[in-house]
Amino acid sequence: MRDPDELAEAAATVAEASRVVVMSGAGISTDSGIPDFRGPNGLWTRNPGSERLSSLRAYQEDPAVRRQSWQARLAHPVWDAEPNAAHRALVELERAGRLLAIVTQNIDGLHQKAGSSPSLVHELHGSMFDTVCLSCGDRRPMRDALDRVAAGDPDPACLACGGILKSATISFGQPLDADLLVRARDAVVECDLMLVAGSSLAVQPAAGLVGLAARAGAPVVICNGSETPYDSLAAIVLRDPLGSVLPALLGGSVRE
């Protein structure tokens, strides 16, 4: 059971900050029906072989991986998901004028759907709502490709050049958008508090932004259901579900 004094201390730390950067991960979206990856009931925890679907090399070389990926996209819960209390708490933080940026590892668009300004949401790992051709870079709405899959095409090719299509997300073996990463780093070094919300902090270079914030002198508050490699850098670590702890933590965000 959580120590009430610990939450009060965390809330006081957050209340003192005026330039908050939030690092969000899959744990913030589990209450919206989107499973995480490394948690006790995560996709890769229950089925380690499914991690292969996130490998760029496997996707490019193995048509079976692509076909399986397209079926997974078609059935993904993201299409019906709605933002939860944790997402909405961050919208209130923005409305209070205290949110500098949300640096997210998520690809589900739920921050924007909740009402967070798209200009403040840095999607380091891309978006599931578009496709991109690995040959010519043609980018189109994901729904167009999913309609083709639903109609019987198991591995839809690029309509512009016939190349391999994938979601506009970052797979293992694929570099992050360099300009986006620079913008995220700029926000991190300017913040006066780093709030980690639902990330295992196991994937670089995104996770390294927490260390960057700590080195720049910003206190770090980590809210995650399991241990992370950066817990030792945190001023406070909370293990409670995000849907309850973030609203409580940010309850004083709105200023009259």
Image: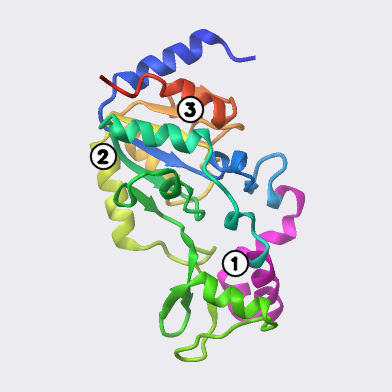
Q: Amino acid at mark 3?
A: Leu
Q: Residue at x 68, y 74 (%)?
A: 65
As helix, strand or loop, the secondary structure at mark 3 comes to helix
- Would you place residue 182 above or below residue 20 in this image? below
Q: Is residue 100 left or right of residue 239?
A: left
- Whichever of labels 1 and 2 marks the residue nearer the N terminus, that label is 1
Position of the N terminus, as image quadrant, is: top right
Q: How is the image coloured?
A: rainbow
Q: Residues within 10 Å of mark 2 (few under 14, many from 20)?
A: some
Which sits in the foreground, 215 or 40? 40
Q: Is residue 4 left or right of residue 44?
A: left
Q: Are marks 3 and 1 in contact (CB under 8 Å)?
A: no
- Would you place residue 171 above or below residue 138 in this image? above
Provide the residue designation for mark 3: 246
Position of the C terminus, as image quadrant, is: top left
Q: Which mark is residue 189?
A: 2
Q: Which residues are the magenta region?
A: 45-73
**Does residue 239 belong to the magenta stretch?**
no
As helix, strand or loop, the secondary structure at mark 1 comes to loop
- Would you place residue 177 above or below residue 63 in this image? above
Q: CA distance from mark 1 to mark 2?
A: 31 Å
Q: Residue at x 48, y 20 (%)?
A: 248
Question: In the image, residue 78 lies at what x, y percent?
Answer: 58, 55
Which sits in the foreground, 29 or 238? 29
Query: Quadrant of residue 9 in the image?
Result: top left
- Whichever of labels 3 and 1 marks the residue nearer the N terminus, that label is 1
Q: CA distance from mark 3 to mark 2?
A: 23 Å
Could one spot residue 20 in this view of the protein? no
Provide the residue designation for mark 1: 55
Q: Residues within 10 Å of mark 3 (few under 14, many from 20)?
A: many
